[in-house]
Image (tube, grey):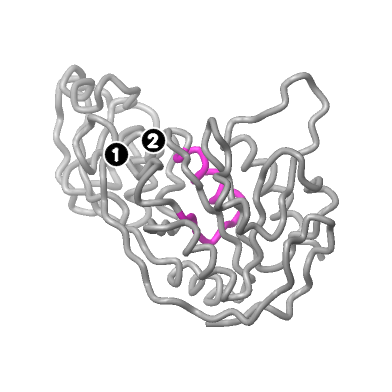
Amino acid sequence: MKNYKNDRRPTDNNKKGEGKSRKPYNKEHGERQSEDNAPEGLIYGRNPVLELLTSGRAPDKLYVASGDREGSITLVVAKAIDMGVPVVNVDKRKLDSMCCGANHQGVAALASYKEYCSVEDILAIAEERGEAPFIVIADGVEDPGNLGALIRCCDIAGVHGLIIPKRHGATVTAVTAKASAGALEHIAIAKVANIGYAIDTLKKNGVWIYGAEAGGTSIRHTDMKGAAAFVFGSEGAGISRLVSEKCDFIVSIDMYGKVNSLNVSCAAAVVLSEAAAQRHEK
């Protein structure tokens, strides 16, 4: 595994320690778990289902509301037929029941949920692309919809992978897949037993850890070009104390209005966009 310890480093006042020799670690795999009431493996919504099919991961079945064959749903059905996926026409009320009343847009697919990978796999993705690791860590994000929106932010920014905890946090569900708007199919996700250990692993591989919290150095004045992982905390409590103590830097978004906080996915969009812009500077 490539070591990034000689890369250029930020020099703001929130630096908590110097770079150390960083080595790979053993793989750590998670288990699939559902957090909503929809059938396990159900993905609904036109864009999420189309992205599923486009990714080449064929579902077991495609359910389409009877008579609903207009607009983008025709592309979904055509792609499924080309892939040999059984297309089942069902009453809209049946889809409503399957999706627990969520907005399915007339289509749902039954497939295995995305397989989780290891932290080492995410580092390997960056190495294969010839890029310094660009990683996001969700520390206790509890709402599956927020997790899906965070995954969408990761994809837009070009993040190599997302790390989530096995416990005390949302996992990938039908709600997550819908909220990701198809991005779930393009982001590697590692589910780990201990976020702190995962951070230690990243540090051993030369990755600097940035915690997104109030009271830190402005992201506009922080160099985030090198190997970096960004930690975003839970909706209520933010980053946990133990995880915060492991961060090399604490960075914040400049705010000029009356509200002093953002939804986790909104905050991630701002921070990751700035980091991505720095990484792509000529």
Name the quadrant of the C terminus: bottom right
Q: Residues within 10 Å of mark 2 (few under 14, many from 20)?
A: many
Residue 17 inside the magenta-drawn segment:
no
Name the residue type under label 1: Ile
Identify the residue at image location x=69%, y=60%: 248
Q: Residues within 10 Å of mark 1 (few under 14, many from 20)?
A: many
Identify the residue at image location x=37%, y=58%: 193
The spot of residue 112 in percent (x, y) is 23, 50
Asked if residue 247 lies left or right of residue 74, the reply is right
Identify the residue at image location x=38%, y=56%: 191
SS type, badge 1: strand
SS type, badge 2: helix
With respect to residue 175, does 31 lie above or below?
A: below
Q: Which residue is mark 1?
A: 43
Counting residues from the N terminus, which is met first, the one under dot 2 or under dot 1?
1
Identify the residue at image location x=73%, y=67%: 17
Q: How many numbered dots are placed on residues in this image?
A: 2
Which portion, as a residue range, is magenta? Answer: 147-163
The spot of residue 225 in percent (x, y) is 74, 63
With respect to residue 247, does 180 lie above or below?
A: above
State the CA–CA distance, disc 2 to disc 1: 7 Å
Residue 150 inside the magenta-drawn segment:
yes
Query: Relative to the observer, which residue lies in front, 181 or 218?
Result: 218
Query: Relative to the observer, which residue lies in front, 140 or 188?
Result: 140
Name the residue type under label 2: Lys
Residues at discs 2 and 1 in contact (Cβ within 8 Å): yes
The spot of residue 235 in percent (x, y) is 53, 32
Q: Which mark is residue 215?
A: none
Q: Which residue is mark 2?
A: 178
What is the chief secondary structure element of the magenta stretch?
helix
